[in-house]
C-alpha cells in the first residue's frame, strides 16, 4: 500500500459517509455508527502488515492520545499497532469529510444561518460606511 492508495480509500469512505449511502448498506441511520462498523472490519485495520503501513502514511499517527482506551498492557505489539491504526484512520476520514464539506459549502447557497450571518455582516459594513 502506498500513500495514494491509502488516501484514495480515505476519500472513498468519506464520500460514502457524506452521501448517505451508508444508510442502505449498513442499516444504520447515523454515520458515526456506520463508520465504527466499517473500521472494525476494514482490511487496513485487521491486517497487521497493512496497519503497520498505515501508520507510516497517516497524517494522524498521534490520534490515539486523544482517546481513552482500556489497559493495553496485555496486548502484543501488533495488536497495539492495529489499535493505533484504527484511530489514525478514523481521524484521516474525519479530516477528509471536513475537506469535502468545506469544498461543497464554497460552491452552494448558504443555509439559513449563513444567510443571517451574511446579512448581519452587510448591515455592519453599511453602518461603518455611513459613520
Image (tube, helix red, strand yellow):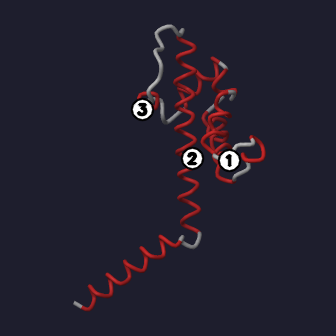
- Tags 2 and 1 touching, CB below 8 Å: no
Name the residue tied to disc 2.
Answer: 96
State the SS at label 1: loop
Q: Earlier in the sequence, mark 3 or mark 2?
A: 3
Q: Residue at x 74, y 40 (%)?
A: 26
- Give how far apart the Cα atoms at labels 1 and 3 are: 26 Å
Tell how many labels: 3
Q: Earlier in the sequence, mark 1 or mark 3?
A: 1
Image position, residue 97 (x, y; %): 57, 49
- Tags 3 and 2 touching, CB below 8 Å: no
Name the residue tied to disc 3.
Answer: 66
State the SS at label 3: helix
10 Å neighbourhood of mark 1: few (<14), some, or many (≥20)? Answer: few
Q: Which quarter of the rendering shows the N terminus?
A: top right
Locate residue 73 relative to residue 51 in the image: left or right. Answer: left
Image position, residue 103 (x, y; %): 56, 60
Most foreground residue, 32 or 127: 32
Q: Residue at x 69, y 54 (%)?
A: 19
Q: Which quarter of the rendering shows the C terminus?
A: bottom left
Within the image, what quadrant is residue 86 found in?
top right
Residue 29 — which label?
1
Q: Earlier in the sequence, mark 2 or mark 1?
A: 1
The correct choice, above or below, for 127 with respect to 44 in the image is: below
Locate residue 1 relative to residue 64 in the image: left or right. Answer: right
**Front of the two marks 2 and 1:** 1
Amino acid at each position: 500500500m502506498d500513500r495514494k492508495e491509502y488516501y484514495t480509500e480515505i476519500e472513498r469512505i468519506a464520500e460514502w459517509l457524506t452521501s448517505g449511502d451508508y444508510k442502505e448498506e449498513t442499516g444504520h441511520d447515523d454515520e458515526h455508527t456506520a463508520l465504527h462498523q466499517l473500521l472494525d472490519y476494514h482490511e487496513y485495520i485487521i491486517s497487521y502488515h497493512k496497519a503497520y503501513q498505515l501508520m507510516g502514511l497517516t497524517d494522524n499517527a498521534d490520534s490515539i492520545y486523544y482517546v481513552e482506551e482500556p489497559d493495553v498492557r496485555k496486548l502484543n505489539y501488533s495488536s497495539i499497532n492495529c489499535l493505533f491504526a484504527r484511530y489514525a484512520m478514523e481521524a484521516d476520514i474525519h479530516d477528509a469529510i471536513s475537506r469535502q464539506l468545506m469544498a461543497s459549502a464554497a460552491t452552494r447557497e448558504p443555509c439559513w444561518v449563513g444567510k443571517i450571518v451574511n446579512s448581519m455582516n452587510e448591515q455592519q459594513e453599511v453602518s461603518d460606511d455611513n459613520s
